[in-house]
Image: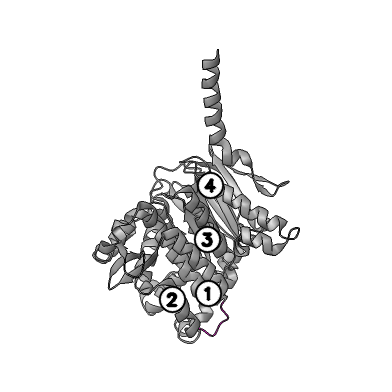
Amino acid sequence: MQKIKIHKLGPISDCEVSIKEFMVLTGPQASGKSTLAKSIFFFKNIKNLLLALLRKNKLLSGFDQMEMSCENRFIREIRSNFLQTFGSTWCMRNDMYLEYHFTPTRWIRLSLTDSALSLNYIWIDLSEEFRNFLHKLDKMDLFDFWQNQCAGVKKEIETFFEDTSEIIYIPAGRSLITLLSSQLNYIYSSMDDAQKRTLDYCTQNYLERILQLKTLFSTGYDQMIQNQILLTDKKIDREYLRSVEALMRDILKGEYRNIEGEERLQVSDSQYVKLNFASSGQQEVVWILNVLFYQILNNRKAYFIIEEPESHLFPETQKKIMQFLSAVKNNGNEMLVTTHSPYILGELNNLLYANNISGKVPKDKLSKIVNEYQWILYSDFMAYFLSRGKVECCLDSEFQSIKNEVIDGAADEINQEFDDMVGLGMR
């Protein structure tokens, strides 16, 4: 099992977290949820940085750049990506460090040290197995390797990291990007590489993904499913896709379409709303739905990191977005969700409970209450509460659920405040 250690990064003082298939982070604002989520994304994305580096080296074959060892080039790439993900190290604690274990013997550690180059210089340590793997890549004829075994390079890297999934980060504050949807192509294409690097890496990665996917949604969800059934020879669970499609329509109150560059929410066959005039809730959630739908439609497995999926949504819709995320996770994906919402946490408990009692009650009756595709296996699940620099498990192992005081803490305080005021009036 992969695990991450964080010491003195942002709001987090100390934590050691095992990476499970389904993780939820909750807690007050500015408690470190995004810091932990970005840290996991940063390390899981390292295999993609290495793959991109090898592709670049193939193109540079024969030039002076090849004189630098693969290990040194790799370390330089990690250092650059850290700065684009977390910003300048000058404001960070000198004793900060991050450590990620892909396996017990394959790990990376980042720390800060003062050097002749700069204050708080990013120092990177690699385990012996990691260094040996990079030395092995150094000895390969990469040009010949890419010419004859392009897929083999990717497979070799995935095998070493023991991770075959894509890593997809969906940040908070999505409505602004959606609001500017018609201008995004122009804005992004007019930026040079240096300007793009000034963007937070997670946001840049999300933005590029949206720009790539937009034109693929020129038809409705139903037609996209039909097209995929015709084009693939793989077995497709049509009932599962239909259930996911129905949830998407219900959440969006329509469906997304891109017609000749114009982004719409199609409300009916004859009515639509331009996306930049849709509600803030629809703008926040539309690309969560689209990105995840595209992945499951094309049977592409991913580790999804989704920040605040409940943003701007009515409580009933928050419940449905959690059902949607659980259904996507149960299609062979992994997921990390950050949230402030008691409705998200409450629905997670319902989905955990449904799976827990599934062998004790009539399955057909239970499925009518909670769709079987959405049930959550407790052994795959972990919930953490972040506060005051600490990261603590907030699961109740006896009841196999998230602790009630985490879900209802604010409501308890509000009720107590009301009772205290009523008590004043009774005296």
| Image marks 1 and 3: residues in contact by CB distance under 8 Å | no
Q: Residues within 10 Å of mark 2 (few under 14, many from 20)?
A: some
Q: Which residues are magenta?
A: 232-236
Which picture quadrant has residue 273?
Answer: bottom left
Q: Amino acid at mark 4?
A: Tyr
Of residue 375 and residue 363, the one placed in the foreground of this image is: 363
The x and y percentages for residue 364 are 68, 64
Q: Which residue is label 2 attached to?
A: 224
Q: Quadrant of residue 217?
A: bottom left
Q: CA distance from mark 2 to mark 4?
A: 31 Å
Quadrant in which the C terminus is drawn: top right
Task: Tell which of 154 and 317 is nearer to you.
Answer: 317
Which residue does the numbered mark 4 point to in the structure image? Answer: 343
- Residues at discs 2 and 1 in contact (Cβ within 8 Å): no
Could you give the CA–CA distance between mark 1 and mark 3, rounded to whole angstroms? 16 Å
Is residue 75 visible to us here? no
The residue that disc 3 covers is: 324
Residue 329 versus residue 62 in the image, above or below: above
Pointer 2 or 1: first along the chain: 2
Kind of residue indicated by mark 3 = Phe
Above or below residue 234? Residue 103 is above
- Mark 3 or 4, nearer chain start: 3
Determine whether the residue tagged by mark 2 lies in a helix, strand or loop: helix
